Image (cartoon, rainbow, N blue to C red):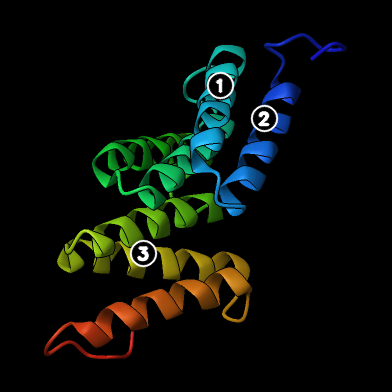
Amino acid sequence: EKSYGPEHPDVAIDLNNLAALLRDTNRPEQAEPLCRRALGIWEKALGPEHPQVALGLNNLANLLSATNRPEQAEPLLRRALGIDEKALGPEHPNVATDLNNLAALLRDTNRPEQAEPLYRRALGIFEASLGPEHPRTLKCRANLDKLLAKLPGQPRQP
């Protein structure tokens, strides 16, 4: 902050990283203001439609979801998806990550019928862009399989 100033995008990266550490060490109440500040910096410095803003939205949404506020998280995840689809194209791995995150929230809020097509789309993007054995692909496939196992009458193969 001293070198770049408090509104520089690099400061936001540091804030975001510190927020992740605080979240991972069970201090979400300390992480949230840092996530919000980082997001605000990116929106102001890079514009509201920049992929870095989408990353900040995802991070804040995941924190909100983890602290039992899915109703606040969902619009952030949907906004992040829209930003990445527009900025990066519909087949970009970041879009697949957004889809996977939104599908997880929908699954966790008892909307599996809405989650399934998002997981399937994310899996297709990951397989095409990263390959079938990439860790992100494998994680998405596991998420879809877990969802399908809980749905009556659904085929297990994606």
Which is nearer the eye, 26 or 126? 26
Q: Residue tagged by mark 1?
A: 37
Q: Earlier in the sequence, mark 2 or mark 3?
A: 2
User: Which kind of residue does numbered mark 3 sit on?
Assistant: Arg
Which is nearer the eye, 87 or 57? 57
Q: Residue tagged by mark 2?
A: 15
The secondary structure type at the circle numbered 3 is helix
User: Which kind of residue does numbered mark 1 sit on?
Assistant: Arg
Q: Residue at x 64, y 35 (%)?
A: 16
Question: In the image, residue 101 lies at what x, y percent?
Answer: 41, 55
Q: Examine the rendered structure and indicate whether residue 94 appears above or below residue 48.
A: below
User: Which kind of residue does numbered mark 2 sit on?
Assistant: Leu
Q: Residues within 10 Å of mark 3 (few under 14, many from 20)?
A: some
The secondary structure type at the circle numbered 1 is helix
In the drawing, what numbered circle is on residue 121? 3
Q: Is residue 79 left or right of residue 5?
A: left
Question: In the image, residue 124 lies at what x, y percent?
Answer: 43, 69
Q: Residue at x 43, y 34 (%)?
A: 83
Screen quadrant of the N terminus? top right
Which is nearer the eye, 88 or 30? 30
The secondary structure type at the circle numbered 2 is helix
Q: Is residue 131 left or right of residue 149?
A: right
Q: Residue at x 73, y 22 (%)?
A: 11
Q: Are marks 2 and 1 in contact (CB under 8 Å)?
A: yes
